[in-house]
Image (cartoon, coloured by chain):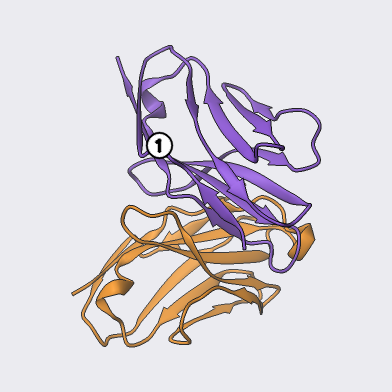
Chain colours: A purple, B orange
Amino acid sequence: AQKITQTQPGMFVQEKEAVTLDCTYDTSDPSYGLFWYKQPSSGEMIFLIYQGSYDQQNATEGRYSLNFQKARKSANLVISASQLGDSAMYFCAMRDFSGYSTLTFGKGTMLLVSP
Amino acid sequence: ETGVTQSPTHLIKTRGQQVTLRCSSQSGHNTVSWYQQALGQGPQFIFQYYREEENGRGNFPPRFSGLQFPNYSSELNVNALELDDSALYLCASSLGAGPNLETQYFGPGTRLLVL
């Protein structure tokens, strides 16, 4: 069974600073994908970034980067130059490449960006 | 490109009633997955439809059922509503299935309150 653990219920950061949101995962599948989604108070889950288990390089998308450490089974999200609009819940999720390939989510981390 | 839409946005029902939630997938996508997100939790997979067939199901009772139509839009039906069914219901659309399932894009969700 797959499991995602997000140990930080909440994080505070000042505008323009960088912040790291932690995510560890557990799976016995050799092939898997890791995702980060942002969920503002409106409820919509917004896709941010994806990392495949066999990708050699860490994924980056604009201000978002994924610090993928396979041996430690961690996939931390780094947001550089935080903006007020980054305040939201952030979810780490994993899919395997067998079966239905559905997403297994963590419990999320609430990020608050202050001016 | 049209994103994922869901209706209604909010719904209040009483125990024992039935509810139908609707989802229009993103243009070009043929897979729809439904998730239930209880307050303070990450989304939990309900089921997935690929080309009008149920392609996978999570740990939800049979009173949760669904449909996918030829245009790939989808419905989630819940019979005999219980208080614990109160949650945000998220629909996600994507292309492909199984190991070929691509990134899932979510709609804004339907907030269901069962009294």
Q: For residue A10, what is the image quadrant?
A: top left
Location of mark 1 (residue):
A8
Say if B38 sits above or below A74 in the image.
below
Query: Considering depth in this image, is B99 or A20 the residue closer to the camera?
Result: A20
In the rendering, at what x and y percent does residue A5 appear? Answer: 50, 47
- Which residue in the rendered view is the most extreme toward the left? B115
In the rendering, at what x and y percent does residue B107 appear? Answer: 48, 54
Question: Within 10 Å of the Cα at label 1, are there few (<14), some (14-19), or many (20+) other Cα atoms?
Answer: some
Numbered marks: total: 1
Say if A31 sits above or below B20 in the image.
above
Say if B16 sits above or below B4 in the image.
below
- Which residue in the rendered view is the most extreme toward the front? A72
Quadrant holding the C terminus of chain B: bottom left
Query: Considering depth in this image, is B74 or A100 the residue closer to the camera?
Result: A100
Q: Amino acid at mark 1?
A: Gln
Q: For residue B20, what is the image quadrant?
A: bottom left
| Left or right: where A54 falls relative to B44 | right
Residue at 64% of width from left, 74% of height from top?
B56
On what subunit does the disc labeled 1 rest? A
Residue at 46% of width from left, 83% of height from top?
B61
In the rendering, at what x and y percent does residue B34 appear? Answer: 52, 66
| Residue B81 in sight from this viewpoint | yes
| Residue B97 in sight from this viewpoint | no
In the rendering, at what x and y percent does residue A35 appear? Answer: 61, 43
Residue at 54% of width from left, 39% of height from top?
A23
Residue at 60% of width from left, 55% of height from top?
B26
| Left or right: where A64 falls relative to B11 | right
Q: Please tell me whether mark 1 sits on a helix, a strand or a loop.
A: loop
